[in-house]
Image (spheres, rainbow, N blue to C red):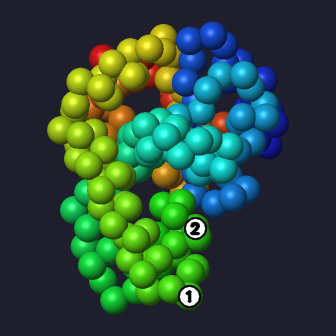
């Protein structure tokens, strides 16, 4: 089954939120935006279409929820940022200009932005902040599209916020249907 077939099987509608892998430029999150009118939890590419304020208030919040659901943690990010070469992580987190800048000052600013913008959101998600619960309750159904061979999402993290309603195993995908707690 190809990704285009997923849209037909999933049939997302009003009140649905799609959660799909967002690790590379050509990943499932970006394609789901093209295949459905349902919102996608997080897609790094959205950053280039948002204002700086929307990136701060919307994109980083959704990214923190996404990171938590994939098993990431604020502590792991902090340790990686303190490592000898955090540029790969800075790039992966969407701070592209800072990750490749030849300027040490700009790279340091990227790390500081992650520490001041993204990590506090991730800590709030880890602590089950009311904003996360409220956000998820805006949707009647949360559809998680994951790979069978290389799962992205941590089932225990999903279960901490969501109730599993059903699961469908397809050739290359696992489609899990949740409702908010």
Camera-nearest residue between 1 and 66 = 66
Instruction: Look at the numbered disc 1 and give the secondary structure of its residue.
Output: loop
Which residue is located at x 61 percent, y 26 percent? Answer: 39
Camera-nearest residue between 55 and 171 = 55
Mark 1–mark 2 CB contact (< 8 Å):
no
Give the image location of residue 50, x and y in percent.
62, 41
Which residue is located at x 22 percent, y 33 percent? Answer: 128
Instruction: Look at the numbered disc 2 and give the secondary structure of its residue.
Output: helix
64 on left or right of 49 = left
- Which numbered disc, 1 or 2, marks the residue closer to the eye? 1
Which quarter of the figure is the N terminus placed in?
top right
Which residue is located at x 30 percent, y 61 percent? Answer: 115
Camera-nearest residue between 15 and 167 = 15
State the mark number for residue 115.
none
Q: Is any part of residue 79 visible from this angle?
A: yes
Which residue is located at x 30 percent, y 83 percent? Answer: 83
Give the image location of residue 162, x and y in percent.
35, 25
Give the image location of residue 138, x and y in percent.
44, 14
State the mark number for residue 102.
1
Q: Locate residue 2: give its quadrant.
A: top right
Q: Is residue 7 above or below residue 12?
A: below
Circle 1 packing at 10 Å, graded few (<14), some (14-19), many (20+), is few
Q: Which of marks 1 and 2 is nearer the N terminus?
A: 2
Q: Locate residue 102: give its quadrant.
A: bottom right
State the mark number for residue 96.
2
Q: Is any part of residue 59 visible from this angle?
A: no
Which quarter of the figure is the C terminus placed in?
top left
Circle 2 packing at 10 Å, graded few (<14), some (14-19), many (20+), is some
Q: Count how many numbered circles sit on residues in the image.
A: 2
What's the distance in space between the residues labelled 1 and 2, CA to CA? Answer: 12 Å
Camera-nearest residue between 1 and 160 = 160
């Amino acid at each position: 089954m190809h990704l285009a077939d997923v849209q037909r099987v999933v049939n997302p509608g009003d009140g649905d939120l799609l959660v799909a892998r967002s690790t590379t430029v050509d990943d499932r999150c970006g394609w789901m935006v093209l295949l459905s009118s349902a919102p996608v939890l997080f897609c790094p590419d959205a950053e280039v279409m948002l204002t700086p304020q929307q990136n701060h208030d919307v994109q980083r919040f959704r990214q923190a929820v996404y990171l938590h659901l994939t098993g990431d943690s604020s502590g792991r990010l902090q340790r990686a940022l303190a490592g000898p070469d955090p540029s790969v992580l800075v790039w992966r987190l969407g701070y592209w200009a800072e990750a490749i800048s030849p300027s040490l000052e700009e790279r340091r600013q990227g790390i500081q932005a992650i520490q001041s913008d993204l990590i506090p959101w991730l800590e709030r998600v880890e602590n089950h902040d009311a904003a996360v619960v409220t956000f998820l309750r805006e949707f009647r159904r949360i559809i998680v599209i994951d790979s069978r061979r290389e799962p992205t999402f941590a089932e225990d993290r999903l279960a901490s916020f969501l109730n599993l309603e059903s699961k469908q195993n397809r050739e290359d995908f696992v489609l899990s249907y949740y409702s908010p707690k």
